[in-house]
Amino acid sequence: MKKLVISVYRYNPDVDNAPYMKDYALEVEDGQDMMVLDLLLKLKEQDPTLAFRRSCREGVCGSDGLNMNGKNGLACITPMSALKGNKIVIRPLPGLPVIRDLIVDMTQFYQQYEKIKPYLINDDKTPPARERLQSPEERAKLDGLYECILCACCSTSCPSFWWNPEKFIGPAGLLQAYRFLIDSRDTATEERLGDLDDAFSVFRCHGIMNCVSVCPKGLNPTKAIGHIKSMLLSRAI
Amino acid sequence: MVKVATTFGRSGTTDYVLLRASAIILALYAIFMVSFLVSAETVNYAVWTNLFAGLGMKIFTMLALTSVLIHGWIGIWQVLTDYIKRSGLRAFIQFVVCVMLIVCWFAGLLVVWPVEGV
Ligand code: SF4
Ligand code: SF4
Ligand code: FES
């Protein structure tokens, strides 16, 4: 048996004056591996007051974005063995207000998402009888964009989002902004670009690429943001 | 979506372009200066004065100083809006920096423009 020390961020605003780190001890079989979410579930058996979000436990719902040993990721698909160092340190996603323990208030994140109008806009007066068709090539442009599960791992690892969460859209929102900008069925490209053409919404991205290094779905927001910048530039010329 | 009046350009895109264009001019000026200093056999008062006597050099220098003004203005505004959250303090620092940049530009003009060769 191996003894593990897991340090978890705790904060219950009803009881605690300030957040603190609580150490838990857990025994695991030698060579046994498990996902960080399973670890948290074991800790919750020890201490039922520990609060965190989870749902699908297979990397699909995006509920359990956490900061594990300094790096954001989904607890349910991050194996314990992937965490470097002897100690495991688990904190909530950085930058967002903490509601309790590992649960953050995602309002700012969703507000930025809402701003980019995450739905198809089409002002075609005579819609086709059945559906709007796309060629396989047009459809292929959405690959690497539509897969986002809005887990917020990227935006909460982005310094530009930490400093201006109410003005900078953030990598997750911008990835979706680009998803609708290049959709052949969307006719609001010009309005969308006009809405993004200020000093904060897109241009606060300085290409630090933290977003790319943490995305659990392997998506590349920086690349999408680069495309948006080029679209804004060619529109200005 | 976000409308702010204190940037230099009209929009995020103009700021972005101005920032990069001024960076290119500054890089060219720096490269020119370094290669001049490296290739010149001696650098004394006469060589230095003659360099700045030409109209081309005066224009290039003023262009570089204008780039410092624009690049500094936008760059400082970006850094301040990231790190200084109290708007009064931020406006004050921005004001001081912009005054310094403008003084720098005029000082450069007054120094460089009247230079005559020896
Ligand atoms: S590349 Fe842009 S969006 Fe991604 S982390 Fe860096 S600044 Fe943020
Ligand atoms: S881009 Fe990746 S990290 Fe960001 S919200 Fe989407 S799935 Fe999560
Ligand atoms: S629990 Fe659904 S993504 Fe981890």
Image (spheres, coloured by chain):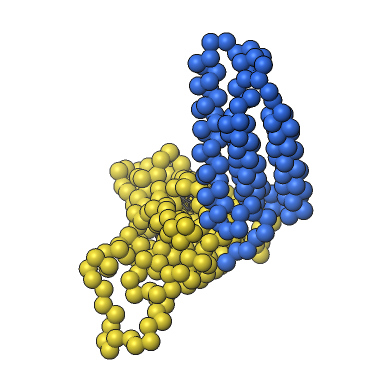
Query: x, y percentage for residue A11?
Result: 60, 57
Q: Residue at x 40, y 44 (%)?
A: A83
Q: Does residue A68 appear in this view? A: no
Q: Is residue B27 left or right of residue A220?
A: right
Query: x, y percentage for residue A44?
Result: 47, 60
Where the N terminus of chain A falls, by quadrant? top left
Q: Residue at x 68, y 29 (%)?
A: B112
Q: Nearer the viewer, residue A6 or A224?
A: A224
Vertical relation: B68 (above or below) A162: above
Q: Does residue A193 appear in this view? A: yes
- State which chain is coloured yellow: A
Tally of marks: 0
Query: x, y percentage for residue A109?
Result: 52, 64
Query: x, y percentage for residue A227?
Result: 40, 56
Vertical relation: A131 (above or below) B86: below
Q: Residue at x 55, y 31 (%)?
A: B29
Q: Color of chain B here?
A: blue
